[in-house]
Image (spheres, grey):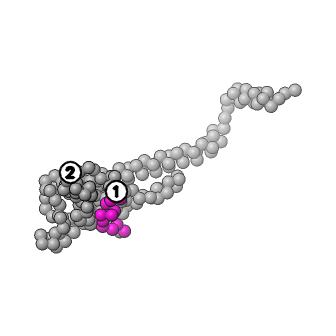
Amino acid sequence: MRGPFSIAARLARRLRRRDEGAMVVEAVLMLPLLIWAFAGSWVFFDAFRAKATNARAAYTIGDALSRESNYISPTYLNSLHSLQQFLVVDGRVPRIRVSVFAYDAAQDLYTVRWSKARGTGIPELTDTMLAEIRDELPDMPDRRVATLIETWVDYMPLFDVGLAPFTFEDRAVTQLRFANQLCFSATASLDDRLC
């Protein structure tokens, strides 16, 4: 009497002995898996590239602002938004918020000096919003001023491989290099500047 294990062993021996195959059947079985693996690799590498590009744009804009010793105007902010669009390239719609904040050691408090946003749906930064991201801000000496550049880029995967559309958000904090404050003036007048 033969048991189920001897039948399985006999089938395994017979399978090992046979070396002919149907290449078409193997291709039909493997091709969907290969296509899915290629598409998945493409989407994940593209998402990583989009994330890295968005972060680089934030750091580039932060570096440009850290070297600025003159006031910032709405035209200057529009040109920074254009620079971000150029750096992000892919036709995605980027958004940016430029904020200047300071640290008060006596109160152990970060305060927003001024904040301006470009792009849709981005409000100006408030002290409350700044307090919510306090853990992401660097330790600073008393009365030190820094810029906070926040960038957003929507990402839509090219293929559906289980990755839903989402938004990349990056923050870059840069301390000023050549001046101890960075002012904003809407009318190019020093009388209405925010510092």
Residue 51: within the magenta?
A: no
Measured from the top left, where is residue 77 in percent x and y? 23, 65
Mark 1 secondary-structure assignment: loop
Pick out the residue farthest to the left. Answer: 190
Q: Is residue 99 above or below residue 47?
A: below
Q: Given the image, on which type of amino acid does mark 1 rest? A: Ile
Q: Is residue 119 left or right of residue 44?
A: left
Which amino acid type is shown beneath numbered disc 2?
Pro
Position of residue 90 measured from the top left corner of the image (x, y, whole percent): 36, 58
Is residue 126 in the magenta section? yes
Disc 1 target residue: 133
Q: Nearer the viewer, residue 75 or 67?
A: 67
Q: Is residue 34 left or right of residue 66?
A: right
Question: Where is residue 96, by image quadrant?
Answer: bottom left
Q: Closer to the camera, 39 or 74? A: 74
Residue designated by label 2: 141
Q: Nearer the viewer, residue 57 or 141?
A: 141
Q: Which residues are magenta?
A: 121-133
Q: Quadrant of residue 153?
A: bottom left
Circle 1 packing at 10 Å, graded few (<14), some (14-19), many (20+), is: few
